[in-house]
Every structure is written in C-alpha cells, then in structure tokens.
Image (cartoon, rainbow, N blue to C red):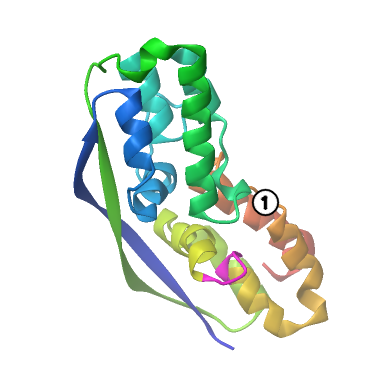
Amino acid sequence: MTFILKDCALIALASGRHAINLGELKSILGSIPADSIYHHFWGGLLHPRFDDPEYRNDFAVWVHRELHDHVLAERLAIIDPADFEDLEMLRISLIDLIEERIDEKELLNWLPAGAPFHFLRSRIVVFDSGMRAETPEDLYRLLPRLSSGCIFYHCIDARRRNSDHVDDFSVWLRDFGEPCAALCDRLAEIDPYFGGLTELRSQIEEVFASIYGGAA
C-alpha cells in the first residue's frame, strides 16, 4: 500500500469569454465549463494574491475592484466552495447571489466595469515528487517536506477526482482499517479553502501529530 506523493502545477488557459458588466457575468456563468469556476475559486491557492487578500475568489475581487460594489463582493467572498457537493451547485449559488444583488440594485445589471472579467480555465500538470510512504507514520514524517503543489494535488484536486470528495490521504489511510478511522475523521473536519495551502499543511500536520507525534 505504497503512497506515491505527487506534485503539481496549474497552467491558466484563456476561455475566450469575458464579461463587461454584472449581467454578462451572470449570463456567462450559466454556460461556462465548470472547470472555469473551479479555476476562479481554487486556482488562487496555488497562485495567491496579495492586493486583495480578504477576497478569496476571482469573482469577488473583480466585483470589488472593477464594479466597486462592496456589498456583492463581500457576499461572494464568504462563499466556501468546499461546502458544495459539486461545481454545479456552486454555479447555481453564484448566479443566485448575483440575481439577488441585481434585484436590489438594477443599475448593476448593465453598469460597465472598469475592466472586463476574463474567464480562465486551468490545466493541471502532475509529476512525481520522488517521495513514498509505506505507513501512516511515514507520511507524517514527510509532511513538512511537501510543497504547496503536493498539498494542492492530494488535498484539493483530489476532492474532484475521488467519488466521495475526500482527500487522497484519507482514501489511502482507509486501507489501514480501524486504527486510522479517527485520523480520517479529523482530516475530514479541516476546511481546505480559507486558510491557504501553508495553513492547510500545518493543520494536517497537527492532526497527524496528535496520533503519531512520537514517531517523528
């Protein structure tokens, strides 16, 4: 049951679609491929922004910076994509929030933005990190060495690859049976979105340390 630790990088790709006002953003959100929504929420974890750190997704940043609508920006900013079963549910929530705001302030439907919102997609490039774990204790010892790309691949991207939407660590740990059940339960309690990848790795280390601290 060797765990092969992989690293990754995201390559941003143009979709060829852009919005110049909130009405267009809402319209395009209804038909843009789901992986574009994924990019604009999760992609920022691998390419963190420093100019608008309080806004965790690209939609909130654009509404704040280019439409200057702080009300909608704040509503979008608190969306946690990890709370949604899939990207289609996230899409519906985004559209509902925008429609709600347009009902409150109709001018926003056509008010031109300072700059257009360019919808992007991402391609994930995966490569072998060279690290291997044979036991949970091995993985615990390797955690401090894992790059942000490794954490992203196994804890973020895994959630859309795995049928039950959990991280790769938990999938692997299940094979060890009951001794790792509590560890999996605690990993499932971690919110992977708002803290960033460095914080996410620290939280995972804390969970492992509570059980395998003496094995370091």
**Rendered-image quadrant of the C terminus:** bottom right
Residue at (60% x, 70% y) in the render = 169
Q: Is residue 28 left or right of residue 72?
A: left
In-front residue for pair 195/34? 34
Residue at (62% x, 69% y) in the render = 164
Q: Is residue 17 left or right of residue 1?
A: left
**Rendered-image quadrant of the N terminus:** bottom right
Q: Position of residue 9 (x, y in %)?
A: 31, 58
Q: Is residue 16 left or right of residue 133?
A: left
Asked where in the image residue 144 lies, by quadrant, the reply is bottom right
- Asked if residue 190 can be seen in this view, the reply is yes
Q: Position of residue 82 (x, y in %)?
A: 58, 49
Residue at (52% x, 33% y) in the render = 96
Residue found at the far bottom of this picture: 1
Q: Which residues lie in the magenta part?
A: 162-168
Q: Position of residue 60 (x, y in %)?
A: 43, 28
Query: Circle 1 sits in a helix, a strand or a loop, which is it?
Result: loop
- Residue of label 1: 190
Number of on-image labels: 1
Callout 1, which amino acid?
Ile
Asked where in the image residue 30 lies, by quadrant, the reply is top left
Q: Is residue 163 above or below residue 76?
A: below
Q: Is residue 183 above or below residue 41?
A: below
- Asked if residue 51 can be seen in this view, the reply is no
Q: Is residue 92 above or below residue 73?
A: below
Magenta stretch containing residue 91, yes or no? no
Q: Residues within 10 Å of mark 1 (few under 14, many from 20)?
A: few
Question: What secondary structure characterizes most of the magenta part?
Answer: loop
Q: Is residue 37 left or right of residue 79?
A: left
Residue at (64% x, 50% y) in the render = 203
